[in-house]
Image (spheres, coloured by chain):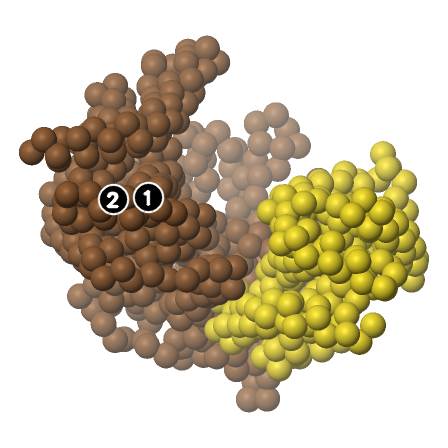
Chain colours: A yellow, B brown
Amino acid sequence: MPNLLWKEWHEQSWKLGFGCVVLGALALIGLHSRIVADETMMMWVSFLGLTMLPVLSSTGLVPAERGEGSLESLLALPVKPSRILAAKTAMGIALCVGPMLVAAVVSLLAAGGREKPDSAIIAFYASSTVATLSLFIWMLALTIQLPSEARSALLGVGLLVFWMLATAALAFPPSVPRLALAISPFALVYGTAQQAVEGQSAPLPVPLVLAVQVGIALALWIWASKRLSNLEGQT
Amino acid sequence: MKQLTALVWKEWREDRAFLWIALGVFVGLPIVGGLEEIVQYSYRFEISASPWVLGFGGVLAVFVAVGATCRDFSGHLEDFWRSQPVGITRWLLAKYLVGLAIVLVACVLPLAIEVSIDRDKSAILLIAWFPFLWAALYGIGFLAGCLVRRTSHAAMLALAAMLLVYFLPVVIPPLQWLNVGAVTDFSILLGQWPRVLGPAQLAFAAGMLGLAITVLALALLAVHFDWRIGSGRKMMYASISAAILILFASAAFQLGTNMPILRQIDMPKGEPIWWIRCNGNDGYVISPRPDSTYLESTFNLRTIKLTESGIELGSPVRVSPQLLWGWYLEHAPGHPNTVYRVTETDKDETGTLWLNVAQLDKGTDKPAIRLGEYEQYSPNASWPHLYASGDRLYVIGARLMTLDISKPLTPHVISNVPFGYSYDDRGFAFGNDTFTEILPPVPNLSQRQRLQAVIKPFCFEGDILCEWPWRGNTAIAYRLTQLTDTKAVFKTIGQYKPTLLEEIFGASNRLNMELQNGLLYVSQYPGNTENPHIDVFDTRGPHPLRLIGHFAAPGVRTVCPLPDGRALVGGDKLWLVGPPPHKGRD
């Protein structure tokens, strides 16, 4: 397992640096100059993270290996596919969490307590990170059998758009049961905060949303692991 | 010559697909749109090609250039061409010129059709000056293709560079002469021809031409010396994100907040500030009440007091929404919490106008004097205006009522005579070069007081008047050039149109304007999540309406400049901010 993690780190660490630099620089420039209100700036940073990081991380793990022809060699190793996927998932999580963490720290240092209290900034980035991770797991599971990075990126963008539209549709009770919003990766960002602020409806309970999201992520991961095992059989 | 003809023929055969596709988009789609307009609205047939050409002309230039270069630099094709008995420079120039001709024809032809058919002739500016921009962008794509030699990577790099060409001149003041916005003017009236030739246009053309020649020379050198850039994913990610960060950093440098927060206090939850009035020490703020709805707007007024240690906020009293519209009110001189306003009751069919006296700090607002029937007072449906001076209050409209307000809470009528003044007769600025304001002949008021009585909807201080008409989204400053007993004449001295960048960052929906100490404060409220902020313009100096200040904060809706240079800004909080640091420079 450490060897698998080292391999992933060796291949993907530049993306981690890239994500950290982009999100950190954006937050630093925007919050230092106060070009917009702090809340708006953090929303922009988190939106960029939400859209960029899951696509960037999920496409570079399995589809890139298939595109380069190295997945067969990897699956031929005397290691269970689930362990390979676990290593890749750990790296993907790092790719999603790292830049959001950097953005949160930069935001706290540049604007902590200025317009929003520190606790609100931390909660905001934490919920955005959960949404990023949820989207990453969705993309990882759905793109695992695609033959190239480009195709998986397209599918990832499509999935992103789908969940944005679906979240908008799920967020309008009474046509949809309120709890249905909990299945959306954006539930923590939208369902528990924004609508409550706008006074449209009561916020979803955070533990419930987290439980639903963890359940969905586990199910997707197990499904992805099986699909990878099937690939091993095909090779 | 024969060689050159063959090369041109070959390039034409390979590039012409771009021309057909571009004409399909730039001419075909606008024709469909024009036909749809006829069917839906029965307008005359017009085609609107310029939005398509403006949006995608640069992209087309990049694609044609990258396609032309990378096609012949892939694999062994380059060796083949280098082995041919034709100079590499001649071969490249043929490639360059044919591709450029295709780009220019694809972009200019649709615009020429638009100018010949449409009543709006502003596209003539694009025909005259944008070919220089497209040539520069085409050259950048050509250089990227020669250096990178991988189609997708070269295209992405060239598109990133295109972003810089479009936006760096917008955000970096020394480069503003290269701004594409300097050569366009979409505010001209239908049927009018814009002014095509001017110093700004010539400077833009010279700059773009210089850029085009430079990148062409670099491309020729790159091929001659076989310079290459080994591109990969890392370089792509790095170059594109670097371009975006450079743009954002430049925008932040230009539009960043530069007014320091001196004091701030939180407002109760759900009560953002919509209106502020303060004389430097005392005043009040008005906020919607938490129980306010779209159907029934209710508001709270709280007094404020500026002290050495901070801002003191008083208890809320419920007030009428009409107190938000400052030009219908008049404060009793020396009594900031006593306000007169005209109201209408419709208990009978005709409607009756009343003069109300409101005590803001106590929340009282009662009819005090019956002015008359609405039809009698305002035959043209224009509301009478109030003007207070000393111990007199004038109600100016179809009748002139003069009241004694030596006891502010109990005004009494001194005279009430037919007057015949209608605010419909006034001149309105609306972006004209000059405009004339007809003054009401109110006895005992000086010329300037008469002007102040009718100029309330505008920002007016000293001899400067400012407005920001919705049409054209442009702030305009006027100077008072003539003042007599009967009229005041104003002449335009400066204007400011927000740049594309500023519009992206929220300069699209102004709410409130105030002029104080020669500085124009404008609150822009495009929505809570779309950067509500304050812009400050200097109306003095040789170039009036120079943007010198910016303050962005949550929910900012209104601003009240104070006599000492500081300002109160209202939004989700109440901020006391310092003056912009560059005040007075030019």
Q: Residues within 10 Å of mark 1 (few under 14, many from 20)?
A: few
Rounded to the nearest angstrom, the CA distance separating label 1 from label 2 is: 6 Å
Q: Is residue B476 above or below residue A44?
A: above
Q: Amino acid at mark 2?
A: Trp
Q: Is residue B346 above or below residue A144?
A: above
Q: Residues within 10 Å of mark 2 (few under 14, many from 20)?
A: some
Q: Position of residue B116 (x, y in %)?
A: 21, 21
Give yes or no for contact between labels 1 and 2 (Cβ–Cβ under 8 Å): yes
Identify which residue is drawn at 71% across, 68% down: A8
Q: Is residue B139 above or below residue A3?
A: above
Q: Position of residue A22 (x, y in %)?
A: 55, 68
Asked if residue B50 lies left or right of residue B379, the reply is left
Q: Which residue in the protein does label 1 denote?
A: B77
Q: Quadrant of the N terminus of chain A?
A: bottom right
Q: Which residue in the protein does label 2 denote?
A: B81
Residue A157 or residue B498, whichever sits in front: A157
Q: Position of residue B307 (x, y in %)?
A: 56, 85
**Is label 2 in a helix, a strand or a loop?**
helix
Q: Amino acid at mark 1?
A: Leu
